[in-house]
Image (cartoon, rainbow, N blue to C red):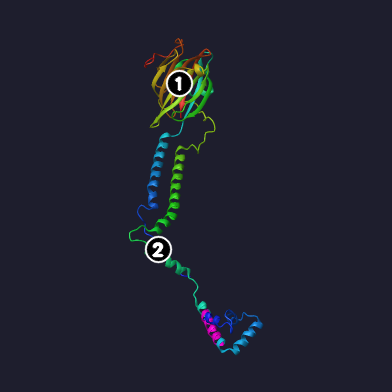
Amino acid sequence: MPHRHRTPAPRRPGGGRAGLRPLIAGLLAAGSAALAGAAQAQGPLTLQAHVILASNQGQGVDKAIEGIGEELRKIFRYSRYTLLTRTSGRAALKETWRTPLPGGRTLQVTPLALQDGLWQVGVKILRGTGASEESLLTSTVKLRSGGSVLLAGPPHDQGILVIALSAH
Amino acid sequence: MVAELREREPHVLGERLGAFLDGELPLAEAEAVRAHLAACPACRTDAVALGQAGALLREAVAAEPAPDPEAVWRAVRARLQAETPVGAPDRRRRTLPAWLAWPRGIVWTAAALVLIAGLTLLQTREWVTPAPGPPALPSPSLAAGPPALVETLEGGSGATVMLYAPPESPVPVIWVFEGEPMEMPDAPPPPDAGTT
C-alpha cells in the first residue's frame, strides 16, 4: 500500500477561516457591550409599601411596624399606628408597579432611571378607576437601595394614611 | 491469418480450428478435425500458427499488470497541477478549507454566543434567583436607610401637596391634602420646602 502524501497547504490571506475572524471579533465586542449594559441595569427594582393608618383611636404601634414606630410618632404625633396592608413588587426600568390603597386610591411607581446605584422613580397617587382615574400626586424621587419615602395625608377612617415606600 | 483459413474453407475450419485448439469442440467433432489435420499439411500448418498466436495472446493477457489506483490518482493529480496556471488561485485550497474551516468557524461562533449569553445571565442573575411571587418584606427601617431626595412634586385633582423634611431623619415626607387642607392635631412645623 503506497503511502499518501498530504502536503499542508499554505494559508491564504482572506480565506474562509480568516473571513470569520472579524465576525467573531464583532460578536465578542457586542457581548462585552451587552455585559456592560447588564451590569448597569442590575435587574428590576424591588418596591414595598407599608400602608399605615395613623389616628388617635387608641394607643400604640402594630408589632409589624415597631421598627419605625418611634419615628412615626416624632413625625406625625398621632397616638395609634395600625398596619393596614403591606405589598411589594418588582419593576424594571420604565415599567410600572401599581398597588391598591384604601378609599379607591392607587399607588403607582415607575423606575425612570438608574445611575451609580441611585434610582430615579416616578411616584403617583391616583384616585378612581378607568376613565375616571385622576392624579392626586405626581412626584419624582431619587432613592438608593434601602431608602424610603413617606407619603401621608389622604384621609381614611378617622385618621390619615401613611404610606412607607421603600426600594431595594 | 483467420482470413486465410476461411479462404481454405474446404479444408478447415476457421473458428472450429480455434475451438479445437482450445479443447472446446465436442468429442466426435474434435476427432473429425484431428483426422483432417493428420491428413492435411496445410491445415496442420495453420493450426500450429494459430496455436502459437493463441499462446502469445494468453501470455500477453497474463502479463498485463493490474491497474494501480494510486498510479491513476498520481497521474490525475499531476495533470491537474500541470493545468493550474502560475499565480492562479489553488482550487484544492479553496475547496479543502471550505470543508474544514467553516465547521470550525461555526463552532467558534457558537461558543462565543454561548459565552456571551451565559455571562449576561450570570450578570442579571434572573435565572439564579427566580421570582415566583412577591419578594419578602423586611420590617421597615426608616432612620437606618440612605437618604432619599424628592426632585419634583405636583398635586392634581384639587389636591395640595407639600414636602416636609423631618429634622434628623433621612426620610422625606410628601403630604397630600385632598380637597380642603385637613385639620391635623399637633401638625408638624411648617415645611422648609415649597408648596404647589
Q: Which amino acid, by three-letter code, is at mark 1?
A: Lys
Q: Which residues are magenta?
A: B44-57
The residue shown at (66%, 83%) is B28
Say whether residue B49 is magenta: yes
Q: Is residue B30 visible?
A: yes
Most foreground residue, A7 or A88: A7
Q: Which amino acid, by three-letter code, is at mark 2?
A: Leu
Q: Which mark is residue B148?
A: none
Residue B80, x across and y down, in percent: 40, 63
Q: Which mark is residue B80?
A: 2
Q: How many marks?
A: 2
Q: Is residue A158 above or below residue A49?
A: above
Q: Are marks 2 and 1 in contact (CB under 8 Å)?
A: no
Secondary structure category for the residue under label 1: strand
The residue shown at (52%, 24%) is A86
Q: Which mark is residue A124?
A: 1
Residue extending farthest right: B28
Secondary structure category for the residue under label 2: helix
Q: Is residue B144 visible?
A: no
> Within 10 angstroms of label 1, few (less than 14), some, or many (20 or more) residues?
many
Residue B149, x across and y down, in percent: 39, 24
Give the quadrant of residue B98. Answer: bottom left
Residue B74, x across and y down, in percent: 43, 67
Instruction: Quote the CA–CA distance across marks 2 and 1.
Output: 80 Å
Q: Chain of mark 1?
A: A
Q: Chief secondary structure of the magenta span? A: helix
| Residue B14 left/right relative to B108 | right
Residue extending farthest left: B87
Residue A32, x across and y down, in percent: 39, 41
